[in-house]
Amino acid sequence: MNVTEKVAPLESTPAGDEREQDFTRHLRRAGELIGAQRLPEGELEILKGLALSPRDLRALKLLALVRFKLGRLAEAREVYRTAHEVAPEDAAVRLNLGLIALKLDWFEEAISELESATRLSPEDQRGWSYLGYAYARTGAKARAAAAFRRAGQADVAAEIERAAPVTGLAAALAPDPIAPRPEGPVGSPAEIAAEQASATGYAFSHLYSDSPAAARTRDGVLRLSVIGETHVRQSALLAAAGEVRIGEARRRRRGRLTDELLGPLDDLFVRCQGEGEMWLTVPPRGRGLVALSLEQDVLYLREERVVAFDGDVVWESGRVPWDGLPLLQFRGTGRVVADAGRHDVVALRVLEGKAMTVARARLLGWLGRVVVQSLREPTGDNPLPHVTCEGEGVLLLSKVAE
């Protein structure tokens, strides 16, 4: 699931209505717990709030979102259906119902819900893009191409019309529910106004082609809304606003922080804490930035290509065995910003039982259960020019060697 949003705290409720004050207190507490990734506790606070106001749309949306993040899709669907009864014309609710149906492979239901979402909000390109995926999964190529064009993805539409084998691609790219758009101070997602995609979707969208995963950054700058803790490379941090404190970042090994600074001395990471916004600029290589959201994924990236990551992901430092290539490993749920524009990357599948050899200089990282190591233990200081990759997953390779 590509849900990486944080929940903004509630504004204060005017005194006078004790029941409303209790409701507000429970949802405010829920927002704090969800922001700290304490989802079960956050769910309990939402339920306490709903006991006071069972038809509150904000609380229903937030509960559905939490249950989705916990992997309880059927329960999330039922809550969204209740939210639909409360607000039949809410496009975000219909969109999320459609996306849950996609996740469950209920494609006809997904089409019905997403068609309704696009009727209610025809300007939302995300709805058209997701509807395109749903059409593609049912073999309705003409409708899929038309939907992708409405989403501003003309190259994907053209690929479908050329009768390319897009069914598997659509399955890999099928997006996950997004957070409901806020109607008040509760449930406001942290939006990334830049290129973003699920890690799986990004990898598969680059298989043998340059299909875009999402919109591009604006003028070479990525805007990142943050709550909690975020690590950012110094050379990429253009500005920060709000209550954001910046300090040293330390390397993590085997689940523990060390005294070693994270990153090379000429381009260290900084540790940013608080709530606000950041603007990241494209690093000197100028390839572009992509914000990848992880949902229980395992992602390895060359340390030098990692630009930022937030506190929700579990991360550690490491190296390629027998080689020494510095890596950062990410797993769980959260966001990772990488220096990897869409024209720079190609992805290749690694199949179980079939080893693959790739140029070390082109290896950006990999997604999934892949074991990467040098061809043999080097006898000198220089690493070998190639590495072997075994297991099952997707390699991310650079078209331009380092």
Image (cartoon, grey):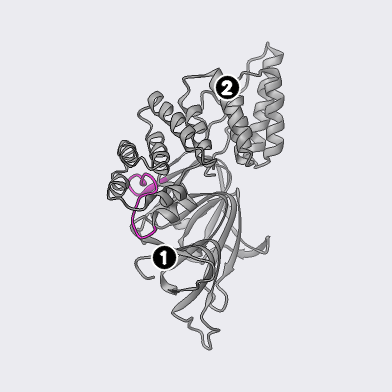
Task: Find residue 172 and report its horizontal and vertical position in percent.
Answer: 46, 50
Q: Which picture quadrant has residue 145?
A: top left
Placement of the N terminus among the 4 image quadrants: top right
Above or below residue 51? Residue 169 is: below
Viewer-side residue, 351 vs 181 = 351
Residue on which disc 1 sits? 397
Quick one: which residue is furthest to the bottom in this view?
Answer: 379
Give the main secondary structure of the magenta stretch: loop
Above or below residue 348? Residue 103 is: above
Q: Residues within 10 Å of mark 1 (few under 14, many from 20)?
A: many
Looking at the image, how many numbered discs can be counted on the residues?
A: 2
- Amino acid under label 2? Leu
Quick one: which residue is furthest to the front in this view?
Answer: 139
Task: Find residue 111 and report its horizontal and vertical position in percent.
Answer: 43, 33
Residue on which disc 2 sits? 57
Viewer-side residue, 91 vs 108 = 108
At x 39% / y 45%, what residue is drawn?
214
At x 36% / y 53%, what residue is drawn?
165
* Residue 124 sits inside the magenta stretch: no
Viewer-side residue, 59 vs 186 = 59
Q: Which picture quadrant has residue 70?
A: top right
Left or right: residue 128 versus residue 89 is left
Viewer-side residue, 132 vs 23 = 132
| Residue 9 visible (yes or no) | no
Placement of the C terminus among the 4 image quadrants: bottom left
* Residue 209 sits inside the magenta stretch: yes
Badge 2 element: helix
The span shown in magenta is 207-222
